[in-house]
Image (tube, rainbow, N blue to C red):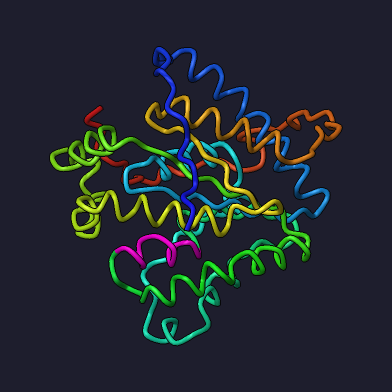
C-alpha cells in the first residue's frame, strides 16, 4: 500500500513568548464564542476528531479550545476501553450516540480511529479487522456528512525527540503522572509500527469529503493557535447582533437582613 506523505519538516520558528501567545489566544477565544452562538442559533452539528501519537498534544489543544466556551455546547468525548458488551457490537457503534445533535460541537479525544491506530498496533484487534475498518470508514463518514454533520479531522504530528521529552517529563511531575499510562510505556518503543499504521490510515481515509488536517505540534503554543485558527476558518459563521446588556439595579439589606450565622470558612493558607 502506498504510504501517505508525512508533514514536511520545516526549520523551527522561534518559540512564541507567553505574552504574544496569550494575546493571540484571547482573540481566538473571542471568535470561538461567536462560533458557539452561531452554532446554537443555526442548529449546526459539528464533530471534531483529534488523533495523534501519545504526547502529541491532543489534550492541551482540546483544553485550549474549550476553556472559554460552554461545556454544554462544546462537548468533549474521551471514551474508555470498550466493555465486553461493546466489543461484541458493530465497530463504531459505541461512538454513534456521542455524535452531535443540532446546536452542538462534539470533540473526540481519540475516536473510531482507535481501530486503525492503537488497537491495531497493540494487538487489540486483528489485522483483518483493522483493514475492514479502513475499508468501511470513508462510507461511515460520508453518511455523517449527508446527515448534516460538519466533520473536521486533525492529526497532531510530533517528532520522536519531542515525544520522548514530553513523556519523560511526566515521570516525575506530580501534575502529569496521571497522563503516563502503562499503555504509553508499551507503545513508546513501537514508533515505526505507529508510523505504518498512520500511513495506511491516511491512505484509506484522507478523502475529499473528510480530509485529514495535519498539525505540526512540536511547538505547543503554535500548534494550539494554528489549530483553532484553522477550525474557525473551516466553518462559515458570522457574529450575531448583540443586545445591549445592563445589570439591573438592586437593593441590599432592604428586604432581608443577614443573620449572624457562623459560617464554616475554609482555611486560607494563601
User: Which image quarter: residue 146?
Assistant: bottom right
**Residue 170 at x, y = what percent?**
20, 41
- Asked if 1 appears above or below 7 in the picture, the reply is below
User: Which residue is at 80% across, 32% downward?
Assistant: 239
Front residue of 82/3: it is 3
Front residue of 95/264: it is 95
**Residue 42 at x, y = what percent?**
83, 50
**Residue 247 at x, y = what percent?**
73, 30
Front residue of 191/243: it is 191
The rendered magenta stretch, by its main secondary structure, is classed as helix
**92 on left or right of 73:** left
**Residue 179 at x, y = what percent?**
27, 49
User: Which residue is at 63% across, 34% downward?
Assistant: 230
**112 on left or right of 11:** right
The residue stretch that appears in magenta:
112-121
- Asked if 109 appears above or below 248 in the picture, the reply is below
Amino acid at each position: 500500500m502506498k504510504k501517505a506523505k508525512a508533514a514536511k519538516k520545516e526549520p523551527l520558528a522561534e518559540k512564541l513568548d507567553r505574552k504574544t501567545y496569550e494575546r493571540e489566544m484571547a482573540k481566538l477565544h473571542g471568535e470561538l464564542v461567536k462560533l458557539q452562538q452561531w452554532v446554537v442559533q443555526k442548529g449546526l452539528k459539528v464533530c471534531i476528531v483529534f488523533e495523534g501519537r501519545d504526547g502529541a498534544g491532543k489534550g492541551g489543544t482540546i483544553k485550549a479550545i474549550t476553556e472559554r466556551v460552554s461545556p454544554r455546547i462544546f462537548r468533549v468525548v474521551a471514551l474508555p476501553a470498550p466493555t465486553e458488551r461493546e466489543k461484541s457490537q458493530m465497530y463504531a457503534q459505541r461512538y454513534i450516540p456521542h455524535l452531535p445533535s443540532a446546536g452542538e460541537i462534539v470533540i473526540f479525544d481519540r475516536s473510531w480511529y482507535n481501530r486503525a491506530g492503537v488497537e491495531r498496533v497493540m494487538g487489540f484487534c486483528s489485522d483483518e479487522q483493522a483493514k475492514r475498518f479502513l475499508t468501511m470508514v470513508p462510507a461511515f463518514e460520508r453518511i455523517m456528512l449527508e446527515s448534516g454533520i460538519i466533520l473536521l479531522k486533525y492529526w497532531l504530528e510530533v517528532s520522536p525527540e519531542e515525544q520522548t521529552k514530553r513523556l519523560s517529563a511526566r515521570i516525575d511531575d506530580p501534575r502529569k503522572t496521571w497522563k503516563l499510562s502503562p499503555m504509553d510505556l508499551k507503545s513508546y518503543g513501537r514508533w515505526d509500527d505507529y508510523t505504518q499504521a498512520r500511513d495506511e490510515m491516511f491512505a484509506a481515509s484522507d478523502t475529499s469529503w473528510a480530509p485529514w488536517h495535519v498539525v505540526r505540534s512540536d511547538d505547543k503554543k503554535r500548534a494550539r493557535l494554528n489549530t483553532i485558527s484553522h477550525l474557525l476558518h473551516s466553518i462559515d459563521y458570522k457574529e450575531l447582533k448583540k443586545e445591549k446588556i445592563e445589570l439591573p439595579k438592586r437593593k441590599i439589606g432592604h428586604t432581608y437582613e443577614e443573620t449572624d450565622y457562623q459560617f464554616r470558612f475554609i482555611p486560607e493558607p494563601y
